[in-house]
Amino acid sequence: MRKGFAAALAVVGVATFAALSGPATGSSFLQVDDATADMMFINYIGQYQKQYSTKEEFLYRMKVFMDNAAMIEAHNSQNSASYQLGINKFSDMTPEELEVRLGLKGNRATSKMARSGENSFIIFNTTDLPKSVDWRPTGAVTKVLDQGSCGSCYAISAVGAIEGAYWNVTRKTTELSVQQIVECADGDY
């Protein structure tokens, strides 16, 4: 076994034993009698190779994960939803932590315009559009990219738009380099 993986497994094992032995002070949220929920979180930790440095962090992340899992389950149980949610590597993060992690920034002026209905865009007739289109089988889109925490969302978006426009003209799927744009931007995007 790799040292890092063995250490993570040991931390998980110790934290799980500690969590199942009794809740820490102030952590009454932990459902110690729900072995399925506990195993769901343990499986999540293993799948995404998560590491928590303290028992308190483990318990907090477990609570956040379980809250997110409950929200996902509630959403997916609605038959009226047009999309499904699922567990991913961010499922142990709060919405606020996720916004910070992904660098999301609200634009008050744009949000105000959207709420008031004001815009400078041309409105097209959308009465004959299909309810949904899956572009994946057509080759119009390439694989999903994960920018991690490098702040390259502008480059990923630009490349995706160019790839889509190129496919629209040529019907050829072409994967372009996000890295070239990042290197050319020199941090001043």
Image (spheres, grey):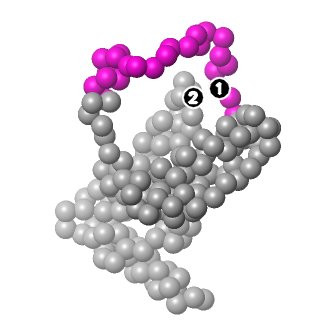
Q: Secondary structure at mark 2?
A: loop
Q: Position of residue 123 (x, y in %)?
A: 50, 14
Q: Nearer the viewer, residue 118 or 149?
A: 118
Q: What's the magenta region? A: 111-134
Q: Is residue 33 magenta?
A: no
* Marks 2 and 1 in Cβ contact (< 8 Å): yes
* Neighbour tally class for label 2: few under 14, some 14-19, many 20 plus, Cα within 10 Å: few
Q: Position of residue 95 (x, y in %)?
A: 35, 48
**The N terminus is located in which quarter?**
bottom right
Q: Position of residue 115 (x, y in %)?
A: 32, 21
> Residue at the location (54% across, 51% down)?
156
Left or right: 41, with 27 as reference point: right
Q: Amino acid at mark 1?
A: Ser
Kindly identify which numbered label has been placed on residue 92: none
Would you say residue 35 is visible in this rendering?
no
Q: Amino acid at mark 2?
A: Ser
Q: Nearer the viewer, residue 108 or 183?
A: 183
Is 109 drawn above or below residue 143 in the view shown? above
Sequence-wise first label, 2 or 1: 2
Kindly identify which numbered label has been placed on residue 82: 2
Quadrant of the rendered image containing residue 170: top right
Would you say residue 69 is visible in this rendering?
yes
Q: Secondary structure at mark 1?
A: loop
> Residue at the location (67% across, 44% down)?
163
Check disc 1 and report the residue beneath it.
Answer: 132
